[in-house]
Amino acid sequence: GAVVSQHPSRVICKSGTSVKIECRSLDFQATTMFWYRQFPKQSLMLMATSNEGSKATYEQGVEKDKFLINHASLTLSTLTVTSAHPEDSSFYICSARRTTVAGELFFGEGSRLTVL
Amino acid sequence: KQEVTQIPAALSVPEGENLVLNCSFTDSAIYNLQWFRQDPGKGLTSLLLIQSSQREQTSGRLNASLDKSSGRSTLYIAASQPGDSATYLCAVNDEGKSTFGDGTTLTVKP
């Protein structure tokens, strides 16, 4: 199956710093990628839809100035958590859909962010 | 707004049993439905994808069905094994956006 790679898998940072998480589709082109946040023992919460070459679409309640998303190529999307605070600590997962809107969705392995 | 519900929230069975996980959704206008597996601290692994025009998909010991009109899908796991222990999530895709259920956490005891 298709592979989506996410990096880093774990990151610990100090409060106030910024952290960048990368999401790459390794063997297919993804015009659209998705970023989710998952709290312990809860399901995925869609944060934003990342579109190649255009601005991301953020879900209601997600601060676009805090969670910067860049989709610079058909295989790479990045999520930057700016001025991170302890409440931003969470599991962040990206996904990419192959080909059409009805295509299969593939997920990265996730990135565990801990803000001290 | 699409809502996805998974029942039960948790399930514990002895090894070898056949089991069924349930997923229901409120809006039947979907493109497809996808079942995932998530191990603790990991991302999601795609198990089966059922397009809206299909009624079922099979992969090994897994069989997923879809009844779009009633807004239901089931994931059938045959001859369960301890390695099947994980959280199973269903996701309904409409207009390019996926809505996830809260998952069923399965424990298969040796």
Image (spheres, rainbow, N blue to C red):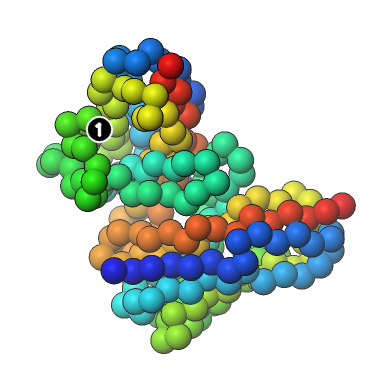
Q: Chain of mark 1?
A: A
Q: Which residue is nearer to you in this view: A14 or A5? A: A14
Q: Is residue A45 left or right of residue A76?
A: right
The image position of residue A26, as x and y in percent, is 40, 37
Look at the image and tell me whether residue A83 can be seen: yes
The image position of residue B13, as x and y in percent, is 79, 62
Q: Is residue B87 left or right of residue A46?
A: right
Q: Is residue A2 left or right of residue B19?
A: left
Instruction: Name the quadrant containing residue A13.
Output: top left
The C terminus of chain A - image quarter: top left
| A4 shown above or below B106 | above
Residue at the image position 62 percent from the left and 66 percent from the top? B8
Residue at the image position 43 percent from the left and 49 percent from the top? A44
Q: Which residue is nearer to you in this view: B74 or A37? A: A37
Q: Amino acid at mark 1?
A: Phe
Residue located farthest toward the bottom when viewing the structure as drawn = B69
Q: Is residue B15 left or right of residue A10?
A: right
Look at the image and tell me whether residue A5 can be seen: no
Residue at the image position 74 percent from the left and 49 percent from the top? B83
Instruction: Name the quadrant containing residue A62.
Output: top left
Residue at the image position 66 percent from the left and 59 percent from the top? B10
The image position of residue A98, as x and y in percent, is 35, 53
| B9 shown above or below A13 | below
Characterize the local packing of mark 1: few (<14), some (14-19) or many (20 or more) Cα atoms within 10 angstroms. many
Could you say whether the residue bearing mark 1 is in a helix, strand or loop? strand
Q: Which residue is mark 1?
A: A67
Instruction: Name the quadrant containing residue A67.
Output: top left
Q: How many marks?
A: 1
